[in-house]
Image: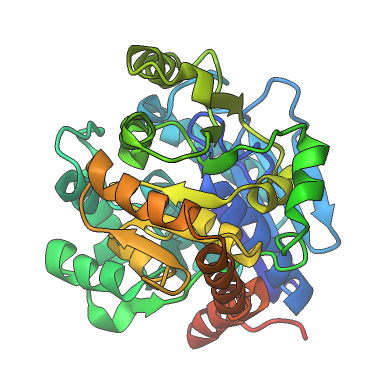
Amino acid sequence: MSTQRIAFISVHGCPLARPGSKDTGGMSVYLHQLAQTLGRLGFLVDIYTRVHDSHDPMLVTVDENVRVIHVRAGPVRAPKNDLFRYLPRFMAQVKAYQQKHNLNYAMVHTHYWLSGLVGQALASEWGAPHVTTFHTLVEIKARARAGEKESDARSASERQVVASVDRIIVSTAHERGALQRLYDADEKKVRVVHPGVDLDLFKPGDQRAARDQLGLNGHHMLLYVGRLDPIKGLEVLLHTLASMETPRGVHLLVAGGNEHDEEYRRLNGVARKLDVQSKVEFLGSVEHTLLPLYYQAADVCVVPSYYESFGLVALEAMACGTPVVASRVPGLEAIVKDNRSGYLVAWHCPDAFSDRLEVLLANDALRQSMGREAHAQAQEMSWDGAARCVAEVYAELGVLALS
């Protein structure tokens, strides 16, 4: 059994943290869902991550084959951009736990660039193959939105991991091309595996019942789900709301963020300046299991991001039968089919978004038709399928599931 144990390394993203809070988003969902599904396939998965709450136990058993191991490396509330300095401490804590419990890992699978550096050293020491999933790449982010600030070490570190790793799993063909073009990645090492969606949790429901349960009124309802980060484009959506002209009231629900975050306060200020604060409700981060109710209650889910490696929020909305209006960026183009399951907007400007939203909100039949198409498309993107593709990548490196 020891030959089938996988070490997931995720320095900053804990799969048990609530998505939508600061520095916690789709990657945490990805980790949780992929690990659990790989566990059902017979792999033993240990997820090493930093303590994100002072009350975190060191060991959390997620299910029979999946565990989360919290290690202390730097202040609990250290921002993501400060974590590079604590990587030696993180790696030392992982090694100490592994040695104390006599664990043998057949594979190291890292997530995000910080983890890639740790995994590079651990895989070499343990004599195990190293697979990485970057989730986001700084060179793509820099080209997607001017002014994005990142650690000076990030670009060089990503290049170092790209050069040394055995396999790179990416979410889209665009990301594969960007790795080759911007990082000189060996195309033989890169595999495209689309993430999935939990089809048991995210599914269509009665809109009126969902609204009643959430205490919502009869206005047209737009929904934004995700971290409050400038690259997610929520400010564009606030300007869109201010410019919309519809015969009925339109309200926006924002699921994500925390009132103590600087970006949360800034965006509230933008809403007040635009005089749309009465039309916007900032919900804070929402429990993952409650998100389907919000998707079901919404008329449209809006994803105005400047960059997405893979738009998991769009896929969750589609699985619930909710049409999506999203930015025409590669990670969303891979999911939303323009004029079928929603609309893709080419420009990050309010008029372009309001035009598409007003068309959908004014036409119930169109909205319902797109919702049905969205649901049908999402059925083809389960986590079972994604995990089996990841398992095939592991098999290329000689690591097989128990069943």
- Residue 351 on image: x %, y %: 24, 43
Q: Is residue 114 left or right of residue 219?
A: left
Q: Residue at x 57, y 41 (%)?
A: 221
Give the quarter of the figure containing the N terminus. Answer: bottom right
Q: Residue at x 56, y 36 (%)?
A: 20
94 vs 191, nearest the viewer: 191
Q: Tell me, yes or no, if residue 86 can be seen here.
A: yes
Q: Tell me, yes or no, if residue 305 can be seen here.
A: no
Task: Single out the residue that lies furthest toward the front.
Answer: 247
359 vs 264, nearest the viewer: 359
- Residue 238 on image: x %, y %: 37, 30
Q: Is residue 35 left or right of residue 195?
A: right
Q: Is residue 249 left or right of residue 185?
A: right
User: Colour scheme used in the picture?
Assistant: rainbow
Give the quarter of the figure containing the C terminus. Answer: bottom right
Q: Residue at x 68, y 55 (%)?
A: 46
- Residue 207 on image: x %, y %: 73, 52
Q: How many badges with numbers are in the image?
A: 0
Q: Is residue 188 left or right of residue 276?
A: left
347 vs 193, nearest the viewer: 347
For residue 49, above or below residue 76 = below
- Residue 163 on image: x %, y %: 24, 65
Among the 4 quarters of the image, the one containing residue 271: top left
Q: Residue at x 36, y 48 (%)?
A: 113
240 vs 225, nearest the viewer: 240
